[in-house]
Amino acid sequence: MRRRVMSMLVGVILTAGPLLAGSPASAQQADVPAEFGTDWHDPITATPPVEKPRTKACDVTLAAAQFRDFTPYKGSYTPPKGCGDRWSKVVLRLEGAVKGRQFDRLGYLHIGGVEILRTSTPEPSPDGIAWNVAKDVTRYSDTLRTEQPVEMLIGNVVNDTYTGVIDVKATLTFYAADRSTPAAHAPDRVLTRAADNTVTTPRNSERIVAEVYATGSGGGCEEYWYLTVPTAAPYSCKADPGPYREVQITVDGQLAGIAAPFPTVWTGGWSNPFLWYVIPGPRAFDIKPIEYDLTPFAGLLNDGRPHRVEVSVVGVPQGQSGWSTPVNILAWQDAGRSHVTGALTDHRVGELSNSSLYTPGSGEERHRLDTDGGHSLSVSGYVNTSHGRVATTVSRTLATTSVHQWTDGENTDALTATWTDRESVRVDGRTTRTHRTYTMDGTTTLGADDRLRTVIALGDRDATSTGGAWTVRDDTYTGDATYTSSAPREERHAVGVTGERYRVHGPGRCYDRELRTEQGTLTIDRTRC
């Protein structure tokens, strides 16, 4: 019988972004227990901390709530006094605590309808854990300059079995601008779509970017979309033609952007919560939005009329839910003109490839699904600004390869997969290139003694170049955990080692931090830069 832990609830929507949980610790001489007990180290990631300017700071509390069900917290936001209204940086901090037994949950935070945070929660120890998330939200400064309604939700269920009440506090810290630290060049407007998925941009917009917080979640098979198979194959999660997914955005029905979704593994994922108790998988607490540069469409969007901006996910069976795709629209305006005209000059859509080949197995011989997919899009346009005509070309190429193998009964289940998303944005002869690569290599095995073991490696990498110099970011997670799956929680005799190394290297930049744990104890916290 299939024993995958489907730990998200159907229909929960969330929103989030950059996160830092925990703080550096000296862990080289930690005492390691023989197995997991009733308490372990608070969640921690190797993610770089948000840099904070050395200017005057003002704090505002956004929300303080306890989540027991699906009732959202609703409050109000008032801009800070004493730090001006043009800030060098704005930092969001979410502090959370939970104890007892609870699944991982999804959460969002809205200000004035704008999603500024999308996150998930760690699963707690019986004795309780605490964690925090820090995110640079300066790009939402336009929203933060006026009083706004606040809504926050981390959907939860509390009963005799799942006892964990999620206690959170969200605050904003505003760093004033001064002569040494100027105000950030944030978007002039931050817009949301109307109920009919339309948006009306300022008529003098010279740059337009859409951000989409796309997540497959909700407790069904789209939470594990990368493991789905065609209906003809004997597996518990089915989706024709297979696991290829692509997040598309359209403007008035015309394809405007494509992207590979990040294969997030939540903290109950791969049937083994012991992998994620201390170190979550990449982005599990830092759910970054996909960004689409829509500037080639600015000439169309700037006509003062509402335009339909819609998001869809290729590969999801028709009528099936499981994806959340909230959208923010960011616009930079031309201060020298009330109306910026322009036109779309080129629109090239490559053929979408998506094939899955199923090879049957029997008994201990593994079934196998080989999947290859990909797509390309190139869009060009120009805008007539007060500082001249500016031409923009956005090109993006996606590719996916995966090999999924499993035995009858799915007692052995393995996936090796790579997703690449290569993008270039050329603005008047200056090109920014971003090469993204996501990897997953994992195997779950349920032995005759009912011991379930998961060994997994996850990679989140990108390289960015503007004018030739490259900055490379590499976030790598590894884990190996085993427990008795049929036993009560206190009798699982779980063991596990996990690790994360986060590196950033580029001109004038070096960050390198490594974490290791054993049985929930932090054993290594090392920095190399």
Image (cartoon, helix red, strand yellow):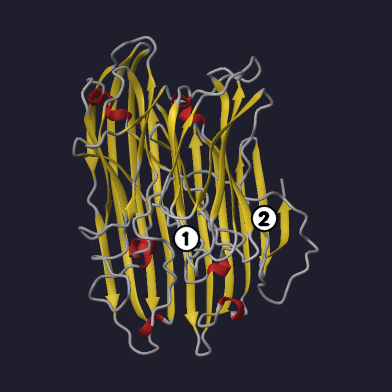
Residue 268 x %, y %: 49, 65
Question: Circle 1 sits in a helix, a strand or a loop, which is it?
Answer: loop
Amino acid found under the numbered disc labelled 2: Glu
Q: Of the two numbered discs 2 and 1 on the same chain, state the one appearing first in sequence.
A: 1
Question: Circle 2 sits in a helix, a strand or a loop, which is it?
Answer: strand
Residue 100 x %, y %: 58, 64
Which residue position holds label 1? 265
Q: In this image, 341 relative to 415: left or right?
A: left
- Farthest residue in the front direction? 160
Q: Depth check: 247 or 317 in front?
A: 317
Amino acid found under the numbered disc labelled 1: Val
Spatial CA distance of label 2 from label 1 is: 20 Å
Query: Is residue 301 in sight in this rendering?
Result: yes
Which residue position holds label 2? 514
**Disc number for residue 206:** none
Q: In the picture, which quadrant includes the C terminus?
A: top right
Q: What residue is shown at x 48% (from left), y 70% (from top)?
A: 442
